[in-house]
Image: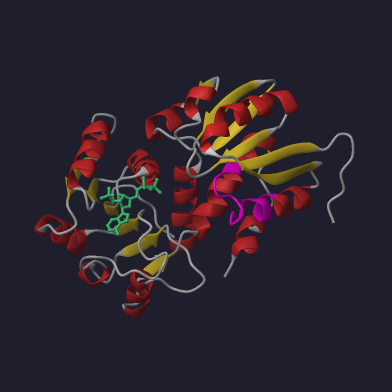
Amino acid sequence: MMQFDGNTKVLGIFGDPVAHSLSPKMQNAAIEAAGINAVYVPFHIRPEQLQDAVEAIRAIGLLGVSVTVPHKEAVMPFLDEIDSGAQLIGAVNTVVNRDGRLIGYNTDGLGLLKSLDQELGFNPHGKKTVLFGAGGAARAAIVALAQSGVSHLVVGNRTAEKAERLVRGFSGHFPGTSFSATSLESDLLQSALAETDLLVNTTTIGLHGEAFPVRAIKSLSESASFYDMVYTSGLTPLQSDAQGRGLNFTDGRGMLAGQGEEAFRLWFGVQPPDKIMHSQIAK
Ligand code: ATR
């Protein structure tokens, strides 16, 4: 049982909704295992309360917060400083209170890279990648993968213009990566899938059991890896397909743990005890 006293530091997560979040369980387990005098609690913050809630971080002296849907972009103007990686992604998922100065970071991309390494043994350097989706989760993944030196990155999205806009924005930043954008139905996507080393799904398709709208896993080669950011209590249709084909694949739980570990490091200046966060969210 966690013990609190007059020196207990408080952290939390801002989200709407927030009740389903696994972060309090994960972070408190790590805090306890590390023997740190702190507690991490959920804060249900509606969009119209976000600015006041951010001010409250300073007023109450919270050590920091995680930021989740739908506040990851909206929180940015209320912070004092945005780390360069978060700026590039255009979203913040971790706020650190350094003596009243609020600094925004994004640890989602690092979480993905840690999980690719730990769960799939996949090193993105020099690899071909196809990514589904063009929202905030895609932006974090694109920056992380391009920074790790993927050679090709094909972004496939239902709304092709959104993928094109993303690719235009990022290609100048990462001259070592060849970017392309396409709709989900294109022949280009099918040939990219056949050649890719890695497929990353950043959309929420499958969360409620929906099938992916086009031929996806079946187009991959046998040696390809599949990273699905979606996680459910069972397997989504995409994940079942990947299992059926015997592919190297994993769901998004490792990324959740990885981003949480990086946030912990930013708040407390130490690594959380190994695997504690993973163990809290295992199936
Ligand atoms: P997040 O910030 O979590 O990435 P988002 O910004 O809402 O969420 O982006 C969701 C992504 O999933 C988008 O790329 C969206 O495609 P569109 O840009 O065409 O909207 C994609 N997506 C969501 N539901 C989808 C569906 N049923 N079929 C295809 N793509 C879908």
Q: Residue furthest right?
A: 5
Q: Position of residue 86 (x, y in %)?
A: 45, 32
- Check if residue 129 falls in the magenta segment: no
Vertical placement of residue 223 versus 34, above or below: below
Please tell me whether residue 4 is drawn above or below residue 172 in the rendered image. Answer: below
Image quadrant assignment for residue 11: top right
Q: In this view, does 262 lie to the left or right of 8?
A: left
In the orientation shown, which residue stands out farthest toward the front? 48
Q: Nearer the viewer, residue 167 or 245?
A: 167
Could you tell me which quadrant the N terminus lies in?
bottom right
For the magenta stretch, what is the residue range?
Answer: 14-27
What is the residue that sits farthest to the bottom in this orientation?
Answer: 244
Number of numbered discs visible in the structure rendering: 0
Residue 85: name its quadrant.
Answer: top left
The residue at 48%/55% (across/down) is 115
Relative side of 123 to 36, left or right: left
Q: In this view, does 175 lie above or below 78?
A: below
Report x, y in % for residue 197.
28, 59
Q: Could you say which is closer to the camera, residue 58 or residue 140? A: 58
Q: Which residue is depicted at the point 39% across and 61% down?
A: 228
Is 62 left or right of 241, judged from the image as shown? Answer: right
Q: Residue at x 81, y 41 (%)?
A: 37
- Please tell me whether residue 16 belongs to the stretch shown in magenta: yes
- Quadrant (top left/top right/bottom left/bottom right) for the C terminus: bottom right
| Residue 234 in sight from this viewpoint | yes
Q: In which quarter of the image is residue 185?
A: bottom left
Q: Looking at this rendering, what residue extends furthest in the left direction?
A: 187
Q: Is residue 274 visible in this depiction of the protein?
A: no
Q: Where is residue 259 in the image (x, y as percent from the top left)?
A: 54, 47
Determine whether, in the image, residue 224 is placed left or right of residue 110.
left
